[in-house]
Amino acid sequence: MKKFITVFIIAATFFVACSDDDNKAGTGTLKVNLTDAPAEYSKVLVDIQGLRINVNDADTTEGNWMDLELDTMGQIDLLELMNGVSIQLSDDEIPAGYLSQIRLILGENNQLVIGDDTLDMDTPSAQQSGLKVNVHDSVADGETFSMMLDFDAEKSVVDKGNGSYSLKPVLTVIKD
């Protein structure tokens, strides 16, 4: 009987030590900054309205979209963000796991300034689904994951002719 009780206690201890509590993913912090490369315009104004990420926890392969809290929102002149200058878009706690994509959501107030002329720019799909950028990296529990979104204003502005322009953003993720 003593052997049975001893084996039972050892088995119970082993079972408790292997419980699921150690497999919880926890949380990390995601910092997202925005910068730009030079362009030949007076101003390139983009209307930032949202930032979403797709992150999978450690136990699933399916992603979950979540909105990040924005530190900077509204119209931003990309040309002020050159030569090492950037602004912080978000510094938010996120679930630890695999970060597959980030989406920058733009509003309707996107404009191009050439000399004294301010022109509205069309932004196809950027207002509904956002500008998708692949990240493909992991955020560990307790880790701060920093990235820079490089918004290339020169390549993003499209001259449609007749004085009209559209914004087809070219974004690159630079991981810190």
Image (spheres, grey):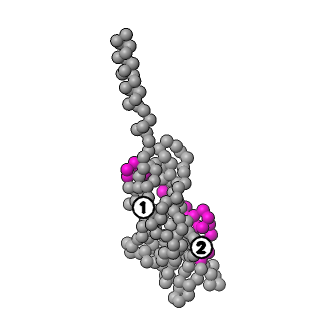
Q: Is residue 153 above or below residue 70?
A: below
Amino acid type at image mark 2: Glu
In the rendering, at what x and y percent does residue 62 appear?
Answer: 55, 47
- Picture quadrant where residue 49 is located: bottom right
Residue located at (35% from left, 12% from top): 3
Q: Secondary structure at mark 1?
A: strand
Reply yes or no: does residue 138 show up in magenta.
yes
- Picture quadrant where residue 18 is located: top left
Determine which of the numbered discs, if any, sits on residue 144 in the image: none
Give the camera-side residue of 42 and 27: 27
Reading the image, the residue beneath label 2 is 108
Amino acid type at image mark 1: Asp
Give the camera-side residue of 175 and 60: 60
Q: Quadrant of the C terminus?
A: bottom left
- Picture quadrant where residue 145 is located: bottom left
Reading the image, the residue beneath label 1 is 91
Q: The magenta stretch spans which residues?
A: 121-143
Within-10-Å neighbours for mark 2: few <14, some 14–19, many 20+? some
